[in-house]
Amino acid sequence: MQPVMHNPERGFVSSANQLPYNYKNYPYYMGGIHALERGYIVNEMLTNMHNITALDMQMMQTDNYDLHARWARPILLKYLAVNDLSADEKRLVQLLSDWNLRCDASEEGASVFASWWDSLNIVLHGDDLAQTNKPIQQVSRTTMLQNLMNDSTNYMFIDDITTTSKVETLQEQVMAAFKKSAPVLLEAAKKQALAWGKFKVNGVRHILKIPSFGRFNLNASGTWNAINAYKGYHGPSWRMIVHLTDETEAYGIYPAGQSGNPGSKYYDSFVNDWVAGKYYKLKILTKQEASNLKDLKGTITISKA
Amino acid sequence: MKFIIAILLTALLGYAAPLFLPWWAFVVTSGIVGATIHQQPWKAWLAGFLGMFLLWGVWAYMIDSANEHILSTRVAGLLKLGSGTMLVLVTALVGGLLSSVAALAGSFARKSRS
């Protein structure tokens, strides 16, 4: 059963790597992690946008709003015993509660959230998953969030099963997760590397993972569930906007370059602009326009061998 | 004087021969230079080495500069050499070694004939 939509009343059709099927119609396990958050925020934004231009779409495609954190942050802050923390640690919590929920490269709160939330995932599920030595998928952040929102303190995986004499509470586990990530965060703060763009891993790798053929340590925005889903070595490579007018007006960019030759300066010349969220106008030329073009870099003539 | 001429001739033929023949043709020309210019074997060896070392070193450096070191830096990373300059040096060294051994062989060949 494929999702189908035809001239919907809301005025737009969207798709953003979200769950491609409905559990009720298709009750089989498909695997993969589908960030529901992205589709949600895309629809939320499109609902509130009217008479938009290509520039608005560019802003939207490179948006770094972290919807997951909007829902998850209150859980962390609610169950943390702030009074038991040191002054440095309190400052970290302050960064998180002041955070504007945007994963822009300069935001420090984004680093605190990501580190703490991922630590909580390990604290809650690490002990349970360690029972098997078979390869097993980590509990996804979305699943953890959903479980904590629904079951809160009754969530069955909260207890650390390695401590048989004691049943941990969510408060204790949230604190344990915080204590796990605080030293990492404070160390990063000392090195002026707490800002999200420096804290998270940002790279564009060569397909063979040859380090000198890729680009690394890019000061980039984005997070896994934002529309600009750039984190680690994964991200929205090909960004494209096409205005459906008679004369094609289109914009696009990807994090590489026009040349496949590693000795060319055009090999990776788009990377910085891609990181900065810039777009290039895509030229669809008629024969006449092509012959009058001023900024032509060169011509390729193709003939029969 | 013979030594300098041997170096220059090695470099000149090492440049010219691969223009028309396979890239390794300079090994043959270096051998011929080693055999025709009569010097002590170690001098022939050194002349053969320096001729090609300088030729390939300068040539590779010129190509690399024209490319603004883009390719040499990437390939140096691939071969774990550290920097593009090291790649140019290694290139020169390979040329020099091949040529020097050929020149030494040429020199010995002449010696054993006479």
Image: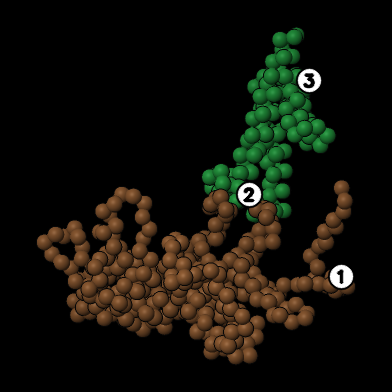
Local SS, label 2: helix
Q: Give the quadrant of residue A158.
A: bottom left
The residue labelled by disc 3 is: B36
State yes or no: discs 1 and 3 in contact (Cβ < 8 Å): no
Question: Would residue A96 be visible to someone looking at this image?
Answer: no
Q: Residues within 10 Å of mark 2 (few under 14, many from 20)?
A: many
Q: Residue at position x 51%, y 69% from top?
A: A20
A282 over A298 or under it: above or below: below
Q: Which chain is green?
A: B
The residue labelled by disc 2 is: B72
A41 over A196 or under it: above or below: below
Q: Residues within 10 Å of mark 1 (few under 14, many from 20)?
A: few
Q: Give the quadrant of residue A123.
A: bottom left
Is A96 displayed left or right of B91 in the figure? left
Q: Residues within 10 Å of mark 3 (few under 14, many from 20)?
A: some
**Colour chosen for chain A:** brown
